[in-house]
Image (cartoon, rainbow, N blue to C red):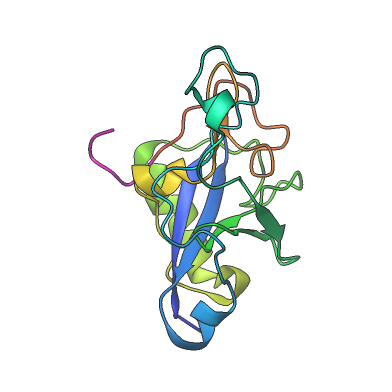
Amino acid sequence: MTTRRQGFIVTVAALAVCWAATAGESAQKCKSTNPKQDFPATGQTTSYRVGDDGNIQADATLSYTDNGDGTITDNNTCLVWEKKSDDGSIHDQHNVYTWDGAFDTHVATLNATTFAGYNDWRVPSVKELQSILNYGMNFPSVSSEFNTNCTTGSTVLTGSCTA
């Protein structure tokens, strides 16, 4: 059992999970090509006026790697998130949690079962959640790699007190 990384959880009608490499060997597993990006790319490709996101297309392009163990790595931040399933397990995309349930049920279960080899999962902050949002849509949402078939319009929980 390893605790070199911290886990995160996001509720999107179900929960997505991630953890961050802190140092040493685990930090070497993900080498971000955009280590200091403050903003993710919006995904907007149509330009409506000079200087807008469609014209400039600045910042980090969303990029993810499926780790094959029920997790997905954000290649820009090196955060590793839970991949949703459709199997009725704790990872099922149809599971919905209250604020307390996200901590008491989902996080507790992931930690107790050492999901993906780690036992220090937690709910992400608003800033951490922003790294997996696709802003190139009319209504920004979690990138499809994380919420395949999740209910449209689902609420996302974070560990932040204010948004």
Q: Is residue 135 visible?
A: no
Residue shown at the point (55%, 81%) measured from the top left? 28
Circle count: 0
Give the magenta range.
158-163
Q: Residue at x 54, y 31 (%)?
A: 56
> In this rendering, would 40 be left or right of 99?
right
Asked whether 21 or 106 is in front, the reply is 21
Q: Position of residue 74 (x, y in %)?
A: 58, 56
| Quarter of the picture holding the C terminus | top left
Task: Name the chief secondary structure element in magenta.
Answer: loop
Please check the rendered image and state whether residue 162 is part of the magenta-colored stretch, yes or no.
Answer: yes
Q: Position of residue 96 (x, y in %)?
A: 54, 35
Specify the farthest residue to the left.
161
117 sits to left or right of 70: left
Would you identify the image quadrant in which residue 6 lies?
A: bottom left
Residue 84 percent coordinates (x, y): 67, 47
Residue 20's place in the image compared with 151, above or below, is below
Work out whether residue 131 or residue 163 is closer to the camera in this orientation and state it: 131
Q: Nearer the viewer, residue 158 or 61?
A: 61
Residue at x 61%, y 45% (from the top left corner): 62
Of 79 and 105, nearer the camera is 79
Q: Is residue 28 above or below residue 50?
A: below
Residue 78 in sight here = yes
* Res 92 quadrant in image: top right
